[in-house]
Amino acid sequence: MAAEAFLDAIRDMGVSHGRFDGCEAVTLAAGELDATFVPGRGMVGVALRHAGAELIDRRAGLGAYIERGAVMGIPFLHPWANRLAGFSYSLEGRDVRVPPGPPLVHCDEHGLPIHGVLAASRHWEVAALEDDDDTACIRAVLDFGARPRHG
């Protein structure tokens, strides 16, 4: 019986457009679960709800995330999550130097790089929204090389 209820829930999928704190937003829904993302602010997840109950803490809110890189929602963490110990690291035999400070990199209260690059970037573009009987999906792209300095 639980499997039948699950199948009924995933059949009720959808994609909708709206606004969140003044920004364009996309909501993906599957049954009683929905997630809202703001593509124009770094693809940040701003809401995750089950049966209407919010499941994430937005802390200081989207505005503080955009302005200061404050903790909020579900950030897109690329190419690293959490903090680095400094402004360089090695990955698969390559040395990577991280550009210090905004707008490319946000730093934590100790001055260390946190949560990847381009947090809250305005340059993400929605490439596709998919909504059918089995899926609700958003695909977005960021042409990192198109701008020497992102903001």
Image: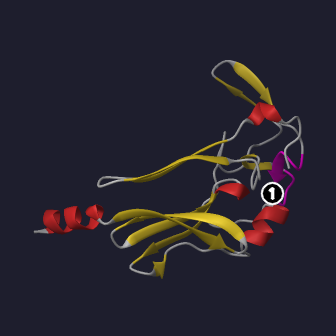
Type of the residue with mark 1 = Asp
* Residue 97: percent from left, percent from top: 82, 30
Pointer 1 residue: 108
User: Residue sitting at 49 percent across and 74 percent down?
Assistant: 55
Tell me where residue 63 sits by quadrant: bottom right
Asked if residue 102 is among those painted magenta in the image, a careful observer would answer yes
User: Along the line of sight, which residue is nearer the eye, 72 or 6?
Assistant: 6
Q: Give the magenta-colored segment's residue range.
A: 101-111
* Residue 78: percent from left, percent from top: 66, 43
Instruction: Say which quadrant the N terminus sits in.
Output: bottom left
Q: How many marks?
A: 1
From the viewer's perspective, is 37 left or right of 50?
A: right
User: Residue sitting at 78 percent across and 31 percent down?
Assistant: 145
Q: Is residue 87 above or below residue 72?
A: above
Q: Give the main secondary structure of the magenta stretch.
A: loop
For label 1, the SS is loop
Q: Is residue 137 above or below residue 2?
A: above
User: Residue sitting at 84 percent across and 36 percent down?
Assistant: 147
Asked if residue 116 is among those painted magenta in the image, a careful observer would answer no
User: Residue sitting at 29 percent across and 55 percent down?
Assistant: 133
Q: Residue furthest left?
A: 1
* Residue 85: percent from left, percent from top: 77, 43
